[in-house]
Amino acid sequence: MGEGLFQPLHLILIIGIILLIFGTSKFSALGKGLGEGIRNFKASMKEGEEPKKEKTEEEKKS
């Protein structure tokens, strides 16, 4: 039943319906917001890794 649910043609059809319902301005704003969210997530992941690297460098000096 779930085989081939997300084939390329289905995805294009879903995107087309979304464009008809919300219009291009809302669709582009959604894409922009999604892109910013991903960038913020990546930046926060990098910030979380930096203190670990500093600690290991400090431990090497000790």
Image (cartoon, rainbow, N blue to C red):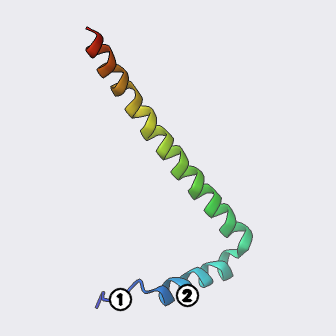
Q: Residue 37 at what x, y percent from top left?
A: 54, 51
Q: Label 1, secondary structure: give it.
A: loop
Residue at position x 74%, y 68% in the image = 25
Mark 2: few, some, or many residues within 10 Å (few <14, many ≥20)? few
In contact (CB < 8 Å): disc 1 and disc 2: no
- Element type at marker 2? helix
Query: Dividing the picture into quarters, in which one does residue 50 lie?
Result: top left
- Residue with the mark numbered 1: 4
Residue at the image point whose x is 58% and y is 80% from the top = 15
Residue occupying the far front of the picture: 61
The image quadrant of residue 19 is: bottom right
Picture layout, residue 52 above or below residue 38: above
Mark 1 Cα-neighbour bin, 10 Å: few <14, some 14–19, many ≥20: few
Nearest to N terminus: mark 1 or mark 2: 1
Q: Position of residue 9 (x, y in %)?
A: 50, 90
Which quadrant is home to the C terminus? Answer: top left
Residue 13's tag is: 2
Counting every numbered tag in the picture gives: 2
Residue at the outermost top position: 62
Residue type, label 1: Gly
Which of 53/23 is in front? Answer: 53
The amino acid sitting under disc 2 is: Leu
Q: Quadrant of the N terminus?
A: bottom left
In this view, 31 is above or below 59: below
Q: Residue 22, position in %: x, y? A: 67, 74
- What residue is at 48 percent from the left and 46 percent from the top? 41
What's the mark number on residue 40?
none
In the rendered structure, the answer to whether residue 27 lies left or right of residue 61 reads right
In the image, residue 23 above or below residue 49: below
